[in-house]
Image: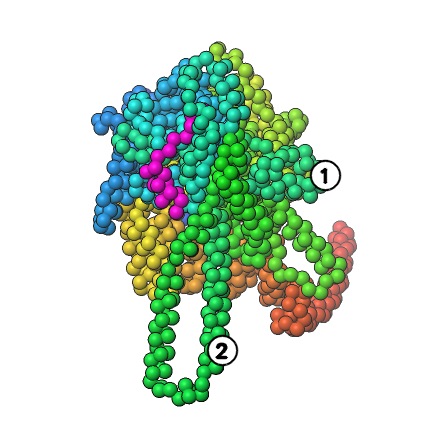
Amino acid sequence: VSTSDPEEPLLFITAVPTGFYVNRSKVSPAGKHQFDPSPASVPCFSHTLLDCLLQKSQSLRETWSDAIAASKERAELTSTSLDSPLQSLFRVAVRGDFNGFNDPSSAMASTGIDTVILRPSWLVPTPTSGDSWNHNDLHEYNATVAENDLGNMFGMDPKLGLKDWNDELQSAREMPKTSLNERIERARVIHKVLSEFGEAAVVGVKAICDGHVAPMNPNEPARTHVYLLNNIFFSRAVDAGVETMKVARGDAASKKSAARDAHCMGCLHRMDISGLYSLATVLVDYLGTRFVCQSIVPGILLGEKTHTLLYGAVEASCPLAWDKGLHETLEESLGKLLMVASRKVPKKPLSDELLDEIEKKRSLMNFLPEIPKDENSEDDKKATITICAPMEAKGIRGSDQRDYILDLVRLTPRDANWVPESEGGTGKWETAANESPSNGKGKRLIPDNLEDDEFVMNVIRPELVTLMTQKKMKAYLEEKEEKKKKKDKEEEESKNDGDSTKKDSDEGSDKKSSKNAENEQKEDKEEKKEPEEKITKEDEAYLESLRYNVNVFLPGTRSLESIDAEAYSQLKEDEERAREVATYLWDQILPSITQELRDSANNVPVDGKNLTDFLHQRGVNCRYLGQLATLAAKEEEQDRKVAQLIKSGQVKRIPRRLIPECWLDILECEMVARAARHVLDSYLTENGCAAATQPAQTIASFLSALVSSGEETAGETEMRLEKEGSSIPDDDEFNSLTMFDTGGKGDTVLPPVRSRGQIWSDIETEVARRFRYTLTLYNTSASSHRALYVPLLRRVCQRTGVRLVARNYAIGGKCLCSGGNSSGGRLTASYPISPVDIVEVVPLVKHAAAHGGEGFVPYTLSASGGPPSLHIALPDAKATLEAAHYHYQARALPQALELAQEAAALYQRVTDTAMHASVARCLDLTSAILFEAGEPQMAAANAARSLGLLVQLNGFDCADVMTAHSTLSHIFLNSGVIDSGIKHLRAASYLMELMAGPRYVELCNAYHKLGSLFHECSQSADALRFYEEASTRPSCDRLMEAMISKSMAIILANLGKFKEAVDSEKKAYRLYGLLVGDDHDLTKSSVATLQKLTQMAVEQGKSKVVEDKKRLEEEAADAIASQIEADEAEESKKKKKKKGKKKK
């Protein structure tokens, strides 16, 4: 047998019946083999071939040892079958056993994580080996790949031809739904069409950005270009023209208007109203530009004769159209289901001043066609029409005779808190600004007024409308019931007074007739009660009066005061009701959220997305993050005052709860992340999107400034480069990242790379404008220890679509945003994040039909990627899942389990896969039911499946995955599988710290629980380590702090450290006394424990003194004995010398 080895060119091995050995055969320089089967000088004999090779080759021994270690780790991962779904995902996602990017076969190493999750991760694992610093994949020329690129159809299928997305979608919605099978088939087709539409929209946006698609209007400015590809209409969300009918002006307002339109279209899709049609809509954010992708209304591109405008207006100067049939449809749908009021508006809604301004701008644009003058223009200015929609909305009847609703930018009124007080707003922000200190950075950054075009699109949440409606309806019914009781009581009293005047002879009447009379009275009462249980016309009228006018506080609109006095009076009432709900949000909802988090820390969000869902469920928009942070800072100041009183001993009782410190951390982190996204978009789109041609430089410098506390000096940069040496990228690697020059021969002036100070100045200005708040934790030297740099980097990457190489970045130190490039290349160095660390920038997609109205999520065009989970148009599945929850709460576990499994099956029949958020919810419910039923193994199996599914849907680091780890840990610990329970609890703790930072409130509880588990397993050293870690984490429960101190005292006593145990128990005793008083059992128990520990500490001290004294005596005796021995040895040496001299 011959084998090659890195140490020797060729080894020849002889096989004999007893084993294998290396022989003396060799290859001559001429290439001739010289066969010699005799054993070599070092034969390395062994019974197996592998052992023989291991003895001979040092490199093989090292490689084999690494392989054995890896095999052992894989065996440990796969030892438990319950965890296999997650472990299989994890092994594929982080695989790194490749030779590096220089090897073309390893090109897929960085995409390992993309093969197991639908959404691209913000961090990309890279191979652990490899000698190239450049993380860009190197590929060899492949003819097949080149052919695919040249024949790219950008989402179109040449065999099937162009798809008519709108016809497919509307035909699917019109499918029969009388039986369950018909409803399932209908939902499947709708889901399929919308999923494919989302994928085609993203492919089209990429093709447009790469310059492969020609615009429909090439003679107009580039920012106003529109495109038609694969029967999808693409446009940029910018303020394209003055002639369009719209209230809000400016690019920022147009960008937000597109998001509002997609959200409202999603509401219509989820309501599934027959007779009212909406278009498939997808928004794509890519490199700072927002694209609106919609299906096409039949006939709208073929001229005015092929479609009819039924509702609203397209041109700004045209009067609003109105159609009775469409209005009735909107009244039945938007009015009754979404509480949108039908109100009169001017037929020409825009004011004369705004129309004159538009006409002046049109006169400067010679390429715009002239608008013919309307003879009835003056009459239209004095006329009104009743609409049940935003005045910007348009109803169009296409050539297919279907009625489509477009530009549905509002379904709730404008937020009166963001309306200037002079224009009818609540004045809450103006009052808050007057109450704030008159000096400081915040006063300079926060605008003096609310005059901002983007704020016109600030509307209240539908959840707040629902909450306010329920509150008023509840008060109305209670008042009605109180009046009824009062009326019945008065009638009963008057009847009793009349009966008392009767004669005594009436008292001896027949009992049977009396009994029959009582029964008749009862029947009459029941007959009276029956109709009262139903909603009366009076109740319906009151409910209708609670509807909201969505056309209040709109700037640039014509006043109704001189047109219709009654309509003007109604408008003022609607404005007052809009101020009422905004005031309720400011005065009641926001303080209640702060108080809720103080009373119970179990609901503290763990990251930005979780925070957004948390606020939206309570009817709060994320623009109130600044006010919530202000309230949190006030609560923290109160807690600090109490802490000072405790130190000075001036209080005898203290409150148990504190505001979680992580609450302010998370709020500021999310504000910075949201502001950073807008600032980075502005950098990428300035100067005609010049920076987008090579975004790695701009993004790397921006992120480096974001996660640093200062900027390096030239001397510090030079010292760092000397330490790093050859590990940093060279100029060739920088230049290889440049996509193309921006023009000419490369002499075009590129956008400047900003310094850290400029970047943070823009971010602080955006935070002050958008949230009316001044940062206290970021870009300040005083509180830099609370800045969450890692969660901030994660959140910014998620909100911008940036993907980074996974490595240990020097976060929190000093940065370099604009280093030099000696060869004059396009890119320059940045630190700690370099341009070569930017793997890619992926599009962010918001699908109008997304599940739960989900916002923008990253999207990849890889084979394993897919659109976000879409809404399932199958009410049966939702009703089945709700019924399962109802039976579970009623503890009817068998019925609940059957319904939960049936709901999961229905969802999977629609999607043809388990990859949907609703399926994960069904699995979670199934796991909870099985756990309650006493089946922990089956519960753990379903919880593990849910965990694996959530990882594939949302990635390894998300709030749902953290909750799934906690659920699995709870199941395992309660079923006695301690080792698996600890693993999942530690995984949950890691995710908490990654997403929310080291000060997250639940980390204290998690580490305390881990310490208790190790204590129960008699591992005192590990238990003490976790208890000490728990004591360093901030907690919002002072009683928990006392419990941790007491647990530490017990562990320290077990380890024989009684002095430290006494100190820990003293802390627990002091907290118990301040929290529950000296007479409480906890305090008395702490006193007894403290006395016992003190006694044991004293005894230990005494014994230690005795032991020390004895040890010193022994050491003294040993020293004397050693001295005597040394003297005797010296004396014997002298005697030997004397004897030697005498012999001589």
Horizontally, is 1140 left or right of 188 in the view? right
Percent across and percent down for residue 1129 are 73, 58
- Residues rendered magenta in the picture: 316-336
Query: Chief secondary structure of the magenta span?
Result: helix
Label placed on residue 610: none
As shown in the figure, which amino acid type bears the numbered disc 1? Answer: Ser
Percent across and percent down for residue 1139 are 75, 55
Identify the residue under disc 1: 438
* Relative vertical location of residue 423 with respect to residue 728 in this rendering, above or below: below
For residue 973, say whether it is visible: yes
Front in this rendered view, residue 1087 or 551:
551
Secondary element at tag 1: loop
Horizontally, is 24 left or right of 833 in the view? left
* Residue 332, magenta (yes or no): yes
- The residue that appears at 42% across and 35% down in the rendered structure is 385
* Residue 616, magenta (yes or no): no
Q: Which of marks 1 and 2 is nearer the N terminus?
A: 1
Q: In which quarter of the image is the N terminus?
A: top left
Identify the residue under disc 2: 497
